[in-house]
Image (spheres, helix red, strand yellow):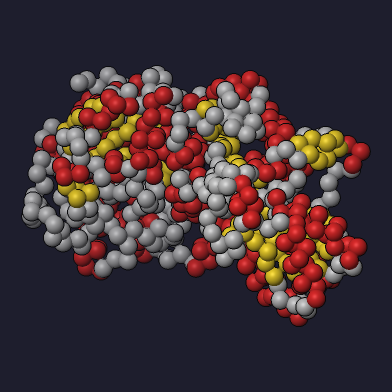
């Protein structure tokens, strides 16, 4: 794999530094949120993405700013990587007026930023398949050159919406890239117990599209395969299914004790940690500086969100109609 | 508040289905962002012929045949709207709302709300609706009340060619999602339709289809014609019925209905959909909340049976209100 598909002139190392900065920022955000949930309790459900940040940031590093993103429910790495402001993301999580949804959030699910092409997420898993194909159709119709990237989990891959979207997207050669985060678990269901194929990507040939498997802990590798898939989509050659192999470090939601699971990750050690994988390539002092900056950024943004007011109840009646 | 149509001098007579076809063509000519997709709408021109000729004029890119994939047709429309286009999609039968329920009731209805108002969802879903003669329990339903119950969806139920055209044009220009219930049993009826491509029928504006003094009847879709026939039969018998067509259920022009009840003091709601928890129940409730002391009698409903629709055309007709049923009920209600 080379970096020739990445859409700008930065060197590979510069990309790595930027990806590391984002991954480590998301990691601190994950830890800050976990701390908050454990200390304060929490009214919503936080679905941690810790350990999966590398693939999220890596894939999105291959996108252009104008490209469209439908993210999945594991954390906020996607939205942050696409350029959204951390305070707004924490604000959504904490149900604050500074959230991107103006206080309608609370939990992880519904960040959005029209400005950054972050189009949101459906609360019913797998609903993003058909929306993503539709947005890609709009790009094809308008000739705007944008590509839509849709994230989903191995569990959502079983939805019928995948079948309907994948067939239509492939037949029409829509500019969409599907990124499956296979962390092995759909809440309490093991992937291997619920999949007829060893890999999600094995299903791609039936839809007439390439299926690519990549090590999801290797952010640079994910960036490379995503860049190729995005190039292909932008050339009008249709969708690609990428399966990033990863691992669910925590429960389905923060607080899930996972009684169904025998392979629980203990302590803070993350196997094949994407932070370390990237960090190995950065000089120690530079890395420390990035870490310190990331930690400070997260703390400031979280404090700002915590200090922000709750929304007025009048928001209940806003935005039902345009 | 009632709107008046364009002056009759500029009208010509055309069919309900032709009126819909014209609305689609005019809006696609007016705005290049408008496109259509659905099953068999392109090459075939739709199983009911509604989109005939449109692929010839606008090409297969803007008039797209899909696979059998209702979740994509509606969910894809939602996504395409977020991407800056104006999708007008067809579900081959309104009943397929259930096949695409997550996309209709969650994505179209709630996406803007859930995401803090950052997006608009200008999608029209065309829904061939109602009893048409032997189509069976899964191809004949009137589901407009279900659409009405979920906040975030506008609901149109045109009963005449002019309203079909004018409401569809308004729907396509509306930044909100619209479920557009076309009655299959009305596709062939003819009526005056304004010649001009600029005549729109606004949402939330009921039409007084017949003025009367004794009894108000609210009816939509296929039932409007039957109510008007019943009114003509009742006139010589001393009952002067006022017939109101709400035309849209969301928003609902309750003011026009209440004003009529304050004049006639009696109200009957006629709908083809099953009786229980139909829109008749909602209208009855709103009227008694607002005009209880104007009523001389209970509000009655004449509705479809609380059964699935049988496939047999005769049995099927027995499940929905006939003109005779409306006449009989009106005579009884007038005597209360």
Identify the residue at image location x=38%, y=23%.
A238
Rendered image quadrant of residue B166: top right
| Image x and y of residue B42, in percent | 57, 26
Q: Mark yes or no: residue A65 visible.
A: no
B171 vs A305, left or right, is right
- Of residues A63 and A307, which is closer to you in this image? A63
Q: What is the x, y in percent for residue B275?
A: 60, 63
- Foreground pick, B243 / A274: B243
Q: Is residue A1 left or right of residue B310?
A: left
| Quadrant containing the C terminus of chain B in the rendered view | bottom right
Residue B10 location (% of width, % of height) = 88, 36
- Looking at the picture, does residue A295 appear above or below residue B23? below
Specify the quadrant that holds the N terminus of chain B.
bottom right
Q: In percent of the image, x 75 and y 57: which residue is there?
A: B323
Q: Nearer the viewer, residue B144 or A95?
A: B144
A246 horizontally vs B285: left or right: left
- Name the residue at the bottom extreme: B293
Q: Is residue A307 visible?
A: yes
Mark count:
0
The residue positioned 43% from the left and 52% from the top of the image is A100
The answer to whether A62 is drawn above or below residue A246 in the figure is: above
Residue A85 placement (x, y as % from top left): 37, 48
Q: Residue at x 17, y 40 (%)?
A: A246
Nearest to the observer: residue B46 or residue B88: B46
């Amino acid at each position: 794999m080379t970096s020739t598909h990445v859409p700008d002139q930065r060197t590979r190392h510069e990309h790595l530094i930027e990806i590391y900065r984002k991954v480590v920022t998301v990691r601190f955000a994950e830890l800050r949120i976990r701390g908050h949930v454990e200390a304060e309790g929490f009214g919503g459900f936080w679905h941690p993405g810790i350990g999966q940040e590398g693939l999220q940031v890596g894939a999105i590093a291959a996108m252009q700013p104008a490209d469209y993103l439908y993210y999945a429910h594991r954390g906020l790495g996607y939205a942050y990587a696409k350029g959204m402001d951390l305070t707004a993301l924490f604000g959504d999580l904490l149900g604050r007026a500074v959230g991107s949804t103006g206080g309608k959030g609370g939990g992880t699910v519904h960040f959005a930023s029209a400005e950054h092409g972050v189009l949101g997420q459906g609360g019913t898993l797998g609903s993003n398949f058909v929306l993503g194909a539709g947005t890609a159709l709009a790009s094809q119709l308008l000739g705007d050159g944008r590509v839509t990237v849709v994230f989903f989990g191995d569990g959502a891959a079983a939805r019928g919406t995948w079948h309907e979207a994948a067939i239509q997207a492939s037949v029409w050669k829509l500019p969409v890239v599907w990124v499956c985060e296979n962390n092995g678990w759909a809440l309490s269901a093991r992937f291997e117990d619920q999949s007829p194929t060893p890999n999600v990507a094995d299903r791609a040939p039936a839809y007439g599209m390439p299926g690519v498997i990549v090590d999801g802990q290797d952010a640079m590798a994910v960036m490379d395969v995503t860049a190729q898939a995005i190039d292909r989509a932008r050339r009008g050659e249709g969708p690609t299914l990428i399966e990033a192999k990863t691992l669910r470090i925590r429960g389905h939601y923060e607080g899930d004790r996972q009684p169904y699971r025998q392979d629980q990750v203990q302590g803070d050690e993350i196997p094949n940690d994407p932070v370390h994988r990237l960090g190995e390539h950065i000089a120690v002092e530079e890395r420390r500086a990035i870490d310190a900056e990331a930690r400070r950024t997260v703390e400031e943004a979280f404090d700002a969100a915590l200090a922000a007011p709750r929304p007025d109840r009048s928001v209940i009646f806003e935005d039902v109609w345009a | 508040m009632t709107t008046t149509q364009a002056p009759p001098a500029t009208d010509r007579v055309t069919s309900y289905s032709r009126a819909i076809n014209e609305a689609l063509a005019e809006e696609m000519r007016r705005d290049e962002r408008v496109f259509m997709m659905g099953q068999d709408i392109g090459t075939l021109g739709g199983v009911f012929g509604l989109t005939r000729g449109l692929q010839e004029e606008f090409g297969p890119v803007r008039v797209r045949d899909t696979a059998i994939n209702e979740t994509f047709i509606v969910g894809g429309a939602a996504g395409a709207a977020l991407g800056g286009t104006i999708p007008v999609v067809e579900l081959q039968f309104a009943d397929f709302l259930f096949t695409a329920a997550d996309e209709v009731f969650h994505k179209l209805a709630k996406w803007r709300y859930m995401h803090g108002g950052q997006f608009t969802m200008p999608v029209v879903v065309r829904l061939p609706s109602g009893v048409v003669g032997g189509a069976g329990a899964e191809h004949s339903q009137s589901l407009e009340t279900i659409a009405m119950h979920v906040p975030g969806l506008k609901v149109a139920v045109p009963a005449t060619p002019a309203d079909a055209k004018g409401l569809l044009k308004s729907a396509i220009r509306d930044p909100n999602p619209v479920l557009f219930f076309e009655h299959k049993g009305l596709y062939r009826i003819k009526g005056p339709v304004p010649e001009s491509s600029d005549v729109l029928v606004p949402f939330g504006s009921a039409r007084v289809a017949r003025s009367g003094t004794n009894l108000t009847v609210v009816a939509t879709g296929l039932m409007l014609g039957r109510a008007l026939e019943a009114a003509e039969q009742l006139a010589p018998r001393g009952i002067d019925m006022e017939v109101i067509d709400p035309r849209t259920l969301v928003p609902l022009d309750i003011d026009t209905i209440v004003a009529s009840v304050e004049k006639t003091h009696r109200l009957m709601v006629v709908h083809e959909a099953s009786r229980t928890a139909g829109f008749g129940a909602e209208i009855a409730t709103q009227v008694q909340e607002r005009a209880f002391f104007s009523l001389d009698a209970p509000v009655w409903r004449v509705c479809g049976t609380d059964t699935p629709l049988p496939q047999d055309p005769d049995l099927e007709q027995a499940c929905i209100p006939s003109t005779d049923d409306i006449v009989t009920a009106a005579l009884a209600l007038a005597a209360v």
